[in-house]
Image (cartoon, helix red, strand yellow):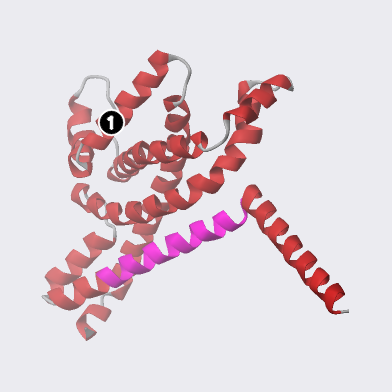
Amino acid sequence: MTQVLEYWPALLQGLMVTVWVAVASITGAAAGALLLGSLRLSRRKAVRISAIVLIELIRGASALVLLFWVFYALPLVPGMPHLSPMTAAILVLSLIGASYGAEIVRSGIETIPRGQLDACHALGLTRYQAFTRIVLPQALSQIVPAFGSLAADMVKWTSIVSFVGVQDLLYAANSVRSATYATVPVFCLLAVMYWALCVLSGAGFRALESVLPLNRALNATGAMSSRKKRWSGEEVRG
């Protein structure tokens, strides 16, 4: 283990790269999931079917194969750009996360009663206004917890980016293992570091969940009810 700790700066550098890839891809996946999930519920049949086909195509492909295709095969297509390893990795992870997150968004939106949309239309709100001001703030209380689990998976998916030359945590760990031949200590340390990243990701989403408008309103209502019950009990005793 002492030999491994001598390479700590390299592992720390790889950890920073992994954190950056995870944060960028989770952010991209969240935006893509919101878009695909909304299109998945479109009233236009062509838009809805196109979104379903795109989601299933991305979900059906292996993440590693998709990464290889974007990085190695896509530049061979005339007119297609040659992406850097980092850009290709973030793009692929964002697309995969968005395809899985789209179903989370769809199910979260569908939990909102249809009558609320009808009431919005009766008040003269456009579909966009109804979605952004009424439906989405309520749906987020269902979407965020489920997306938090997906984000933890995405942290672990970042390990594939080393296959296209991104010097992430796994890449650094393999370099240290090759230099020290300390296979067991290196991979034990690697497992602990990925576990810590997943725990931090979950904590971040739980913190986000606690500040959502609907959850804050429910917490405030619960606190008010508790105070009223306490006051009522004090009056009865009095």
Percent x, y of residue 235: 87, 73
In the displayed structure, would residue 180 be above or below residue 71? Answer: below
Going by the picture, which residue comes out furthest to the bottom?
2
Q: Quadrant of the N terminus?
A: bottom left
| Left or right placement of residue 31 versus residue 141 in this view | left
Residue carrying label 1? 56
Percent x, y of residue 158: 30, 53
Res 82 seen here: no
Quarter holding residue 193: bottom left
Percent x, y of residue 40: 42, 27
**Region rendered in magenta:** 191-212
Quarter holding residue 113: top right
Instruction: Determine the secondary structure under disc 1.
Output: helix
Amino acid type of the residue tagged 1 in the rendering: Glu
Going by the picture, which residue comes out furthest to the right?
238
Residue at the spot 64% in from the left edge and 48% down from the top edge: 214
| Left or right placement of residue 187 versus residue 42 in this view | left
The main secondary structure of the magenta stretch is helix
Towards the viewer: 80 or 156: 156
Res 216 seen here: yes
Residue at the spot 19% in from the left edge and 78% down from the top edge: 185
